[in-house]
Amino acid sequence: MLPPNNSLTMPSCTALTSSRLVRVSLVTIAFVACCQLSPTNVTRADENEITSVKDEYRRSVLPLLTQYCFACHAEGADEGNFSLAEFASVDALMSDTQKWWAVLRNVRSDVMPPDGEDQPTDAQKRLLTQWITGRVFASSRDESDPGPGTLRRLNRLEYGNTIRDLMGVEFDTSVEFPPDDTGNGFDNNADALSISPLLTEKYVEAAREIVDLAVPKASQVIPSRLLEADAFEISNHANSERISFEEEATAIVKFEVAHDANYQVIVPILINGSFDFNPARARVRIRLDDEVLHDYEYGWTSGIQDEVSVERTLSRGEHSLGFELNPVAPKDAGAGESKDEKTFVRLQIQAVQIQGPQDPSQWKKPDGYERFFHLDTPPQDVAERRQYACEVLRRFCRRAFRGPVDENYLSRLMDVAGFSPSEEDAAPVESQESTSFEQRIGRGITAVLASPRFLFRVEQPDVASAEMFPEVDEFSFASRLSYFLWSTMPDEELLQLAERGELKKNLVGQIERMLRDERSERLIENFVGQWLQVRDVESVSIEPLAALGVSEEYEQLVDYLESTVSGRSAPPEDASQEHLDAYRRYREIREWRNKLDGDVRRDMAEETERLVSYVLHENRSLVELVDADYAFLNERLAKHYGVPGIEGDEIHKVKLPPGSPLGGVLTQGTFLVVTSNPTRTSPVKRGLFILDNILGTPSPPAPAMVPELEASAEQSHIENPTVRQLMELHRSEALCSSCHARFDPLGLAFENFTAIGTWRDQEYGQPVQPAGRLISGESFDNVTELKKVLAGSRRTDFYRCLSERMLSYAIGRSLELGDEIALEQITNELESNQGRAQSLITAIVNSPAFRRMRRLPVEADRP
């Protein structure tokens, strides 16, 4: 029912045809009536603002909706299940943000009004989009509002990188921790980074293991060196460290010592035998210079380990250590490793350890000692020792917690580490040697690594600010910056700038420095790996033969030939012509089977990463990610794509030949493979991928009752229908046509590329037809022209989509409608800077969502 006493006049509709005028008149009255305020629930303080919103809507927005939208989305018309005639009040009008988000997205991308209908001018579209973002989305949010706060756990990649930079050791998080969930397409999204009791236990176990690997257990250790197995010179087995019991052999390594001193020499012995018994036996001697250290006869075993450990005085200079192996069983007794024999006995050469000098005066600091301890040895005085321990733990906590540590926490940590006054004063230092100073520091570090303060990124507001949306403090900002660009903790330069309160003042220089650092490649690996699904290219299931259209008869031929010519480097001399043809076809098919092996997949992933890295670090225009006249290829990839004249295994920048369809991420194997089905291309997946990740205009999910594309083949009378023909049949269903009009033209434009990324001109003997017309009206004849459309008239859509994705990644949360203001500013910044890649980074870092946080209410303010 319409509110009474409607005094607002209906806007002029002279631009409408008479039939459309009749259709929208009542809807217009209803919409105008929605703007008539009722005094109920409206405070006097809000009256001016609400009246302003109402007047602006009535004066500027309603005429546009009436002229361009109501005919299809009002007065009983709800095409696409979308109606604008449901509001009963101004509050309802302003609160239905999801509906306005759909309007904004479709108008901004020229999807609505549809091609062929009257189109609003650029000024009208700008007016409508600015009203939606500035009034509807921002009606309950200040422009400086950074959105909801996040308490983010380090994902397993960030954890592994942080451990490497903090502790100096590698820790394989992919083995120790389960995969992280994703939110909004990224695994650093706070909403997806939950923590369970089981994961908490794993963090505690990991802390113990990492500390055991990284933290020295004493201030001085015996020097030790390894003589690796590959350093031995082995007679009769030049390319192997496994010495057969069949023939005599020697293995010798030379080494030098720097001092006349006592050394411990530790030589491991490993004998391996085949599963089945072999009667071979051999005498194994170990010599140190001219002295025999070990002499023993060994026989077959499924695996026996022995060790020779002796202490000897060695003079300064060169020495040698060697194995001698002498068979003692006859050669015809069953020993041997001829190609046809299946049993064996072998001596496995392993690394030899030389420890010394044994004199404590010549011992050295353990590796990595300076990382944790800043004095050569702990003080002997108990009080000084405790003070030193406190300083060591404070320094470590500052780095581990990415900021200063609370003194109360530090006091409790000293107790955990065993440095409480009662424990330290109970006995002199000499009686505490069973647990060294370093071991107790390690105990404290274990507690730090298992602490929520380390595992979670806890951020604080600037204490000098009393704003509701203050900027984060310098330490929190340093963490945001380093985990965005490096996926790891801040380095010492960032921390020192934060301590002096100078990081934000030197932001431009620090961004440039961080992008020059090799750790910025982690932004490429982690952001691009998820945005463009590069991570999936090595694991996605593709059947090359079926994807290349190899017939069933060929596959049957392969099964037959596997047992006849498989393994031959050439056909037999007496082969018939029929067999020669079969052999040639078999070799061809086997080559096809290897078209998408592991090396090619890894090359594809690196190709995409190298392109994005080049655009970012050279500060080039981001549109080159969509359309470029160069590519990053090696010989293997070039042959795969059909690009001549490229040699070598190293992927490098290549100028593409004129007319090449390659260039940009959309013609790279990563995109083409991950958007295909196991046995064929998928225009639907490819089109949806572009809508989601390039244009930022995702299509609604398909209804549950929509049939699979393959079902259309059963209705077709065409033998071996092409994918385009199947799509046309599928799209003829009314339920499918509206959505497919969005993504089909995009996906079908790439039909010249097979499911494994190779080029084809025909499918089932019919020419591929890549031409199409976008729902926004642009036409193209092939993929090259489509890329120019995406990089040209749809450039702003790409800027906005990429900005949205990277902003979400940078702040670790899904974006909300209120973030549209920040996105608009970032997009405008890109437009004004010709799309330069580093201007995107700078604009994101300067956005309120990145720099600010919502201040939590104090207890007195809470309900």
Image (cartoon, rainbow, N blue to C red):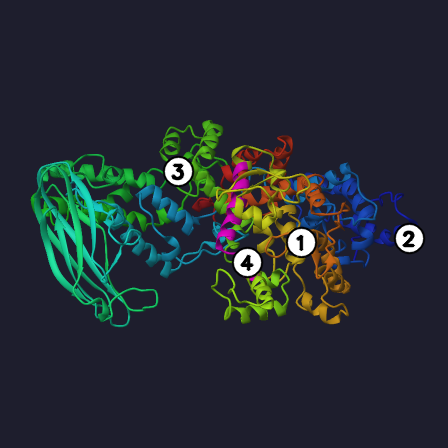
Mark before the other along the chain sequence, 2 or 3: 2
Q: Indicate the amino acid at tag 1.
A: Arg
Residue 19 marker: 2
Look at the image and tell me in which quarter the N terminus lies: bottom right
| Residue at position x 66%, y 52% in the image | 98
Cα–Cα gap, marks 2 and 1: 50 Å
The amino acid on which the numbered mark 2 sits, given as a three-letter code, is: Ser
Residue, disc 4: 591
User: What is the x, y in percent for residue 119?
Assistant: 81, 44
For label 4, the crowd category at 10 Å Cα-Cα, with few meaning under 14, some 14 to 19 and many 20 or more, is few
Q: x, y percentage for residue 362?
A: 12, 37
Give the Cα distance between marks 1 and 3: 49 Å
SS at mark 1?
Answer: loop
- Say which residue label 3 marks: 490
Residue situated in front as seen by the camera: 795 or 447: 795
View extreme (right): residue: 18
Start and end of the magenta stretch? 589-614
